[in-house]
Amino acid sequence: MTTLLAACLLLGAGLALYVAARVARLGGPPAAFLDAGRDLPGWTACFLLPWLVLAGLGLDRHLGLVARYGLQASHVAVGMALVAMAALLLWNRLWHAARLAGLDTPGEALGRYYGSITLRVAVLALALLFALPFAADLLSSAAMLIEAVSQGALPRAAGIWLLALGLAVPAIIGGWRAAVLTAAFLSLFLFVLLPGITGFAEIVLPGPGFPAAPIPVGEGILWDRLPGVVRHVAGIGKAVPAEGIFTTLAVSSAALALTGIVLSPAALYFGQTLRAGRALGLSTVWLTGGLAAGLLVLCGPVLALRMAGGVAELAASLQAEEPLAGAGFLLLLLLPGLMLAGFLVTAGALIWTRDLVLRYLFPRLDARTQRFAARVSIAVGFFLMAFMAAFLPLVSAVLATVALPLAVQLLPALLGLSFLRWAGRGAVLAGLTLGCLIVVFTEPPGLILFEGLFVDLPWGRWPLGIHSAAWGLAFNLLLVLLSAAATQRAPDRRERDRLHDALLAATGFRIGGRGLLWALALIWGFLAYGPGAILGNFFFSDPIFAPGPASALGIPSLWVWQILFWLLGVVPVWWLAYRLRFGRTSEESVRPIVLGPPAGLRPPDWLAAGIARVAGRGPRARPPATRAPRRAGRR
């Protein structure tokens, strides 16, 4: 199986190299290396978005949790409709804003809209967090799996550098277009592997499968029901409920945290560089909220039951029946993480190149030199990512825990750019700062730092079983609302109004109105993955309105509830995409505007001084004529 798996990985690397070479041979302007000319084909979103979400969830980690906790862990898959709605709303508006005001990156979009250098720096820091520790943790996990199944024939460190090389070379050759096309092609294979491997395992492996047999979990864990709405526990590391950790609030907050993958700088950059068309609706409605969520709901418990003995044991059992099936199962677990790691590093390197190197360090480079600088940045990014994975795996794993919840803290800023014109710079910065602090101190980095230097905190990770993303966002939004109420007439309100007026003229639709449909969507969320999901524990096995003894379905009531609300979850996504027309983008009615300060404004003094020190240049006095007046309240 080791030889066959290596051959499959080499085949994937060869496909990536072929795609990159074809992209490079097609030529095009050198500047297109960085953003594909903002003309990525729509079908890439159709295949890539669903598997970005599954890779962010962690397919191998998710199956392991389902094998340990049963259907209560599988319930997180129902929340994929929430992720699809977030991508639909924010990517559509960010795409139009980028075309209207010439905004090349997420950092530039937020920085120009709010007139804030701090938001630019925050997006750069978040892009770095995803590109290095988060991607390094994914790469390290993939290399550990290969080492385990090869019985040490390929050590973890060697596997890391070989995998990093296979991911880096196509990105260096073909740039952003090659990286996206390669990931989209690999995603297409995964759509076939997940149902194929699940069906094959049920056909050839002995013994009853799910739902004929229960998922073997630890003593006391409720495998076929959600263990309540909330548990009054201090959090992981302090106390863990005996019945399981996936209460309804834990499930809903985990679904909220999963939206962090579509709010990450890399995913937002991907949305900005898509070609106009209707692909956004198809990818979110039918492929993310429909097919990908359905595969996870239907196949996850079935495959998790077979994984009760471990990944290596299931791979060996499949390999004994059919060698290609064993290799396919391992590819199913390896490819999402590898695909996401390559995507994040490439996007992070390009964002840093555009927002820092080409804007502040070397703003006068020609197009060919810009392309060379981008290639150097990609190579350095992959090297640093592999270095962290090989030599700092524990640091990478600890820092990776805050990546998704920190990305969720960008939600108020993105909503302000997209819909809420009353959310000003001060309110967004205050909320972002508080939300990030709450996240850090409810995740391992803050807990380890504080308890190592001072005293033990009374809570652990995810107090009350609620994900840190929800804790941070709750305080974030509260402070934004309070601050925005006091800054309605801020000096930057005029610029915000100009963009929102231009967005309304270009798209012709608002998010408001149709109160009944919004109410139905909220009711669906309450029952699907919110507190109302607790009704699914017994609704179909012991319905409250049915007389007589409990009915025998032969399958757990909670699984029926998950299937039902997965199907119903497609409806609100479809409504947003097609009835409110968020699923299409068009350049026909785009009338460009100039947003914020001119591009030639000098950077802030603190940033200019730092750049001068790094570049080895002393500070140079600027003629008074070249100095632009400071904007009131500029940060």
Image (tube, rainbow, N blue to C red):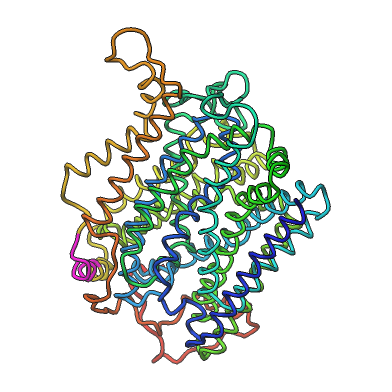
Q: Which of 290 and 231 is in front in this view?
A: 290
Q: Where is residue 175 in the image (x, y as percent from the top left)?
A: 55, 76
Residue that appears at 35% across and 36% down: 565
- Count of marks placed on residues: 0
Residue 287, given in percent of the width and then of the height, sits at: 40, 53
Q: Answer above or below: position of 212 versus 521.
A: above
| Camera-side residue of 206 and 629 | 206
Q: Residue at x 52, y 52 (%)?
A: 192
Q: Seen in the image, is 152 located left or right of residue 592?
A: right
* Extreme residue in the top direction: 548
Which residues lie in the magenta part?
A: 500-509
| Residue 351 location (% of width, % of height) | 51, 71
Residue found at x 35% / y 21%? 539
Out of 575 and 309, give the one closest to the viewer.
309
Q: In this view, does 486 lie to the left or right of 630?
A: left
Above or below 56: residue 452: above
- Looking at the figure, which quarter contains the C terminus? bottom left
Horizontal arrangement in the rendering, residue 221 relative to residue 551 (left or right): right
* Residue at 38% in and 48% down: 289
- Judge whether residue 506 is colored magenta: yes
Q: In this view, does 545 lie above or below 72?
A: above
Judged by its main secondary structure, the magenta piece is: helix
Is 424 part of what is drawn in magenta? Answer: no
Q: Position of residue 467 (x, y in %)?
A: 49, 39
